[in-house]
Amino acid sequence: MHSLWTHIHVEPGSERLIADAYYLTMNESLQNIVQALGITIVVCLVLATSVLALVVHRLRRIDLPPDANFWTTIRAVPFGLVLGLDLLDLALDVLATPIVWAILSRFRLQALRNAALIEAAIPFTQALPTFTVAWIVARTFGLGQAQLTDRHVIDVEEVGPDRYAPRAGRR
């Protein structure tokens, strides 16, 4: 079996030129890959930050029991949260874990926080949108308890026995 190089006539002394051309081609390819990864990271970070900023108000209004399991929690959160967490995970890989931990702790979403930690420990799951898929599965198959919400209920506080007044200010 003959290699391709045995059929190509190379002038003496031009081997170095061929090697240099091959090296430059590989260097440019590597440079293009690194540049594409950098652009992907920046775009994912900007999108994640934007989406998470949009859902902060909705996250403040989630009222989950302290012992809510993963499926109940994932079903109660808005889609923007899981999308933002997956974009953050894609952009920063393992470095996103402390940021995700802080966000989920801030909104008392311990079941998701623990799942995020486990997901970060498993190699090669950063490119998979695990929270987004889990959110879709929970909504499609009715996993977890549905959050009881009634948009016509006014947020009130008890001011006396059997007396209620609208809650003033934010929670």
Image (spheres, rainbow, N blue to C red):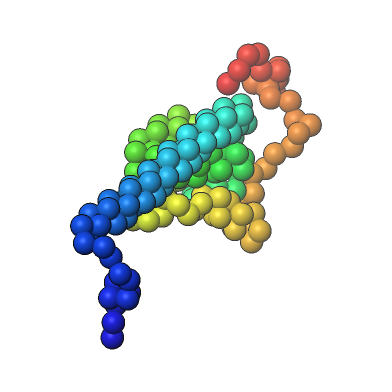
Q: Give the answer, above or below, for where 73 lies relative to 105.
A: below
Residue at the right extreme?
152
User: Residue 99 in the image: x percent, y percent?
Assistant: 40, 33
Observer able to see residue 91: no
User: Residue 28 in the image: x percent, y percent?
Assistant: 38, 46
Which of these two is toward me, 103 or 10? 10
Using residue 153 as the reference point, say whether residue 67 is left or right of it.
Answer: left
User: Residue 69 in the image: x percent, y percent?
Assistant: 49, 50
**Count of numbered tags:** 0
Residue at the bottom extreme?
1
Observer able to see residue 164: yes
Which of these two is toward me, 92 or 67? 92
Which of these two is toward me, 139 or 25? 25
Say which residue appears at 55% left-offset and 35% top-offset.
Answer: 47
Residue at the top extreme?
168
Using residue 121 as the reference point, say whether residue 125 is left or right of it.
Answer: right
Using residue 75 as the reference point, say whether residue 85 is left or right of it.
Answer: left
Say which residue appears at 23% left-offset and 54% top-offset.
Answer: 16
